[in-house]
Amino acid sequence: MTVVLGQIESLIRIRKTLDQEGITRFNSIGDINKFIKNYNIEKEDAFFKIQNDVDLEIDVLQAEWHELQKEYDTLQSNAITTLEDRISKLNTKCVSIGTTTAKNVFIEVANWYRLLFFIPIKFLLEKNFNRLISWKTNKKGGILKSKIKVIKAKMPNRQVTISKRFTKKLNELEHIKEVACSLNSLIAGAIGEKLVEKELKKLPDTHVLFNDFSLKFNEPIYNRRENDHIYSIQIDHLLVSRAGIFIIETKNWSKASIARSDMRSPVSQIRRASFALFVILNSNNSEENSFLNKHHWGDRKLQIRNLIVMINNKPKEEFKFVTVKVLNELNDFINYFEPIYDESEVESIVQHLKNIKN
């Protein structure tokens, strides 16, 4: 299987855009396409989820409120029962003392003093009943009332809360959709490049594939024929094999896009990259081409071929210095060429490309 180095450029740009926009939910192109397809369903699901969440919050707060109220009512009820029991006992004592016949004057006087003691206490307890209940429940009851007050303050207005939360969520979803839809051309490119990578992986491990091979030049390379100063190049796929190097530009275009005259020419694009790469790799100024074994006839040239791979459709026309193939013709085209380098030379070329790439 082909050795693959680097990540597909379109995927890198998609990830960079998502990161810049603060979108972390997507892990693949499939996730993005699924989101766009199910956008309306997700909006509905978001509304019902928010509605259920708010209802659950209200239920939990109400349950907590009812528990605290129940605890407070029990506390108050116990205090009332205790005080009523005390008053009842005092009343029983007073009635008992008042109806008991004294055996002598001393007992009668004692009972009279006892009534003078119990009756005022009973009177004060009855007169200040509510105040005493409040005093008895003041500490713990106050804590319970404070907690109930806090819960009441936290209790959301159902409709207003749902509306606010859904508006926020809807704005978030609309932002994600806007960004996702803006990536359509990159997604199409990434799908095409991924298909090309998958096809090239079927080749033997004597092949090495560079995804997103790019170079920047401190001094531009001048193409006299085109009067073009080349400051940088970017190649979708650079395949190194025993048959040479293949510069592969991938286009996932429709028939309509192929026919449009305002689309940038991939032929011009790949020829520009090919010229710069040829100059760099076949330079005699230094040890740039030392990765090729010497031949007794002289210095050898590094073979570079230009290939545009169209995923579904391709033009009927043929172009100078560039071959155009559809995806299912790709590997047959590469395998057509006879090996001209040995495995050590391929390894040296690969290492050299690793050293010079950005």
Image (spheres, rainbow, N blue to C red):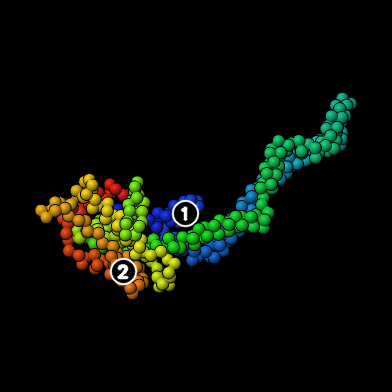
Q: Residue at (23%, 53%) from the top-left corner?
A: 282
Q: How many marks?
A: 2
Relative side of 237 to 284, left or right = right
Q: Decide which of 41, 231 is in the foreground and name it.
A: 231
Q: Decide which of 105, 81 is in the foreground and name it.
A: 81
Give coordinates of residue 60: x percent, y percent. 61, 51
Residue at the extreme top? 106
Label 1: few (<14), some (14–19) or many (≥20) C-alpha neighbours in 10 Å: some
Residue at the extreme left? 296
Question: Dot 2 corresponds to which residue?
Answer: 319
Q: Residue at (46%, 51%) from the top-left corner?
A: 19
Q: Quadrant of residue 336?
A: bottom left
- State which quarter of the image contains the N terminus: bottom left
Residue at the extreme bottom? 316
Give coordinates of residue 104: x percent, y percent. 87, 27
Q: As shown in the figure, which amino acid type bears the numbered disc 2? A: Phe
Task: Tell me the SS state at disc 1.
Answer: helix
Q: Residue at (22%, 49%) from the top-left corner?
A: 284
Q: Residue at (32%, 56%) from the top-left corner?
A: 223
Q: Quadrant of residue 268?
A: bottom left
Q: As shown in the figure, which amino acid type bears the numbered disc 1? A: Leu
Task: Tell me the SS state at disc 2.
Answer: loop
Give coordinates of residue 68: x percent, y percent. 66, 45
Relative side of 34 to 310, left or right = right
Relative side of 69 to 110, left or right = left
Q: Decide which of 49, 270 is in the foreground and name it.
A: 270
Measured Cα–Cα span from mark 1 to mark 2: 37 Å
Give coordinates of residue 53: x percent, y percent. 59, 55
Closer mark to the observer between disc 1 and disc 2: 2
Question: Dot 1 corresponds to which residue?
Answer: 18
Q: Quadrant of residue 31?
A: bottom left
